[in-house]
Image (cartoon, rainbow, N blue to C red):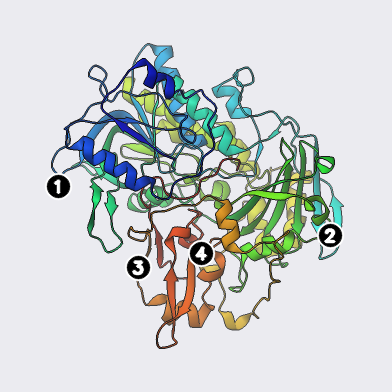
Amino acid sequence: MQRLISLRSKSNSLKSLFNPLKSPQKHSISADWSSCFHQSWSLIASKGCFSRVFSYGLWPSCAKMRNFDKNQGFVRRFSNEAQRESIEYDVVIVGAGPAGLSAAIRLKQLCSEKGVDLSVCVVEKGPEVGAHILSGNVFEPRALDELLPHWKEEEAPINVPVSSDKFWFLTKDRAFSLPCPFDNKGNYVISLSQLVRWMGIKAEEFGVEIYPGFAASEILYDANDSVVGIGTNDMGIAKDGSKKDTFQRGVELKGRVTLLAEGCRGSLSEKLIKKYKLREKGHAQHQTYALGIKEVWEIDESKHKPGAVLHTIGWPLDQKTYGGSFLYHMKDRQVSIGLVVALNYHNPYLNPYEEFQKFKHHPAIRPLLEGGTVIQYGARTLNEGGIQSIPYPVFPGGAIIGCSAGFLNVPKIKGTHTAMKSGMLAAEAAFGSLREGTSLKSYWETLGSSWIWDELHRARNYRPAFEYGVIPGMVISALERYILKGRSPFTLKHGKPDHEATNAARLHSPIEYPKPDGVFSFDVPTSLHRSNTNHDHDQPAHLRLKDPKIPETLNLPEYAGPESRYCPARVYEYVSDENSQLKLQINAQNCLHCKACDIKDPKQNIEWTVPEGGGGPGYSVM
């Protein structure tokens, strides 16, 4: 993706060039876009003003020019290098995903309904809206029906209704059909990254300002320790910490209300949860997670059944590891296929990426993929804690929404509709606090009386049931669904946090995975290429070790170096130094922003922070 920096040009020709409603044209993401961007920025900064035009799709389909100042246009003076530019909004939203965009749209709807004007800004670390969005996805339109009831007429990319719904139990060589516990009637097979891109355009039409390519790296506080916005990270810093010729200070985006919609394991959200003790305040248990690994294939037309949905449980995972696969027939001969592995697995030798590669060779799966090609690859963690793990979502000055708080419905394997609804409820609370003098705490209150809470309460015992193993978990889940129907007189608790669940390597045997055949299974570099992942190599590593000695002194001898296996992008490798001693090497440029390392490291020694804005994967059909 590229960004254009210009000098407040508002000519008709420029307006026609940057039309957000044009179909995006496909181009590769340039590895040196950041360098070009900063050279242009520096030139304009020296002239004392700047104007930005941001792209929604890949160049040249861009968002309309936006005004920071209601009367003076998109102009700000740069101060000296030691200070950051500061821009004020009524509401600042971090993350242009389903929750963040739903909140932004709902805020602007309320403004229209009440005849008031609130400025709303959405900042997104991905190079374009939707670039970091990955999900299955069988979409339940309940929240979208409430938010944008005319989405069908407005050509939302939701046009493949579920046509069949199957559930299999897999052994190594066979597939056994089970009663399907999923009720997907009225749902749709979609690409969530495409839906989010469409929502971004809708948000802009309502007057929301969206700025992709800017990573929120810190929380801003006032003298009373209340949140007053976010700061984006400095750009143009070399790997050794020195300032490159392209160096530019980050920007402060200050808001009267700040909403965090960063997705699962959001870095800023986690800091605020700890700082304000929100998990304790909400009487919540720890969060538990899973890692989803996904590919989109293009298959033979004779095998394609638009809307067909398949879920499996069992092989290739062992009987103590929770997880399963999904296979969804999308449009245009595309199939979404993936494996979800709970991150509280015990065996440090388990490699989720290799388990997924192995899965595709199953005799019930392989025939569908024969003759097909992989279009895209990606991975992302997801929350599985359910209602037991939702923290108190309100902090002084703002709130946490969507998967940053953790509203995924595990037995449904759906979280988009609940994330969207949470954003809408938070928007209503924010509007009330800004215009009517009510408290942001009303967000927590309305959550408790909403269909989100009812849905998650009925689903609360499914995930912790699998702490006892796959078969006991299936039995308890069947009891919950078909007999108790979510009205259990008890609530099960989760086991150990995921990082504590990893056993010592001496308790397990190494797993020998088959070599990839290049037809159904692939090595990591090949898959990474399909993710369009790109980072500027010459920047400080955004994956930080709290104690640089732990990998070699503890993780390697005690757990056999699990970071080299739980990461689906080969970010972490143990390589021999000049003394033939194994040392951890961090290939941060490979990072898919999945957050598995931040969750699964046995001693919580890895801290995931945001890299320069615009880096990371470039998903288009995920």
Q: Residues within 10 Å of mark 1 (few under 14, many from 20)?
A: few
**Image location (x, y in percent) of residue 211:** 38, 34
Amino acid type, label 2 = Pro
Q: Nearer the viewer, residue 143 or 43?
A: 43
Q: Which residue is farthest top?
A: 115
Q: Which residue is mark 1?
A: 82
Name the amino acid, label 4.
Lys
Mark 2 vs mark 1, CA separation in Å: 62 Å
Contact flag, marks 3 and 1 (Cβ < 8 Å): no
Residue 93 falls left or right of residue 233: right
Residue 547 place in picture, x, y as percent: 35, 72
Q: Residue 551: horizontal and vertical position, in percent?
A: 43, 76
Image quadrant where one finds the N terminus: top left
Q: Residues within 10 Å of mark 2 (few under 14, many from 20)?
A: few
Q: Amino acid at mark 1?
A: Ala
User: Element type at marker 3?
Assistant: loop
Q: Which mark is residue 513?
A: none
**Residue in the image at 38% along x and 45% along y:** 33
From the viewer's side, name the closer residue of 591 and 605.
591
Pointer 3 or 4: first along the chain: 3
Q: Quadrant of residue 398?
A: top left
Mark toward the start of the polypeptide (2 vs 3): 2
Q: Which residue is mark 3?
A: 546
Q: Position of residue 581 (x, y in %)?
A: 44, 85
Identify the residue shown where x is 31% and y is 19%: 10
Residue 449 visible? The answer is no
Residue 559, compared with residue 592, is above or below; it is: below
**Residue, disc 4:** 600
User: Residue drawn at (25%, 30%), measured in percent from left and top?
Assistant: 88
Secondary structure found at label 4:
helix
Mark 4 Cα-neighbour bin, 10 Å: few <14, some 14–19, many ≥20: many
Identified by mark 3, the residue type is Lys
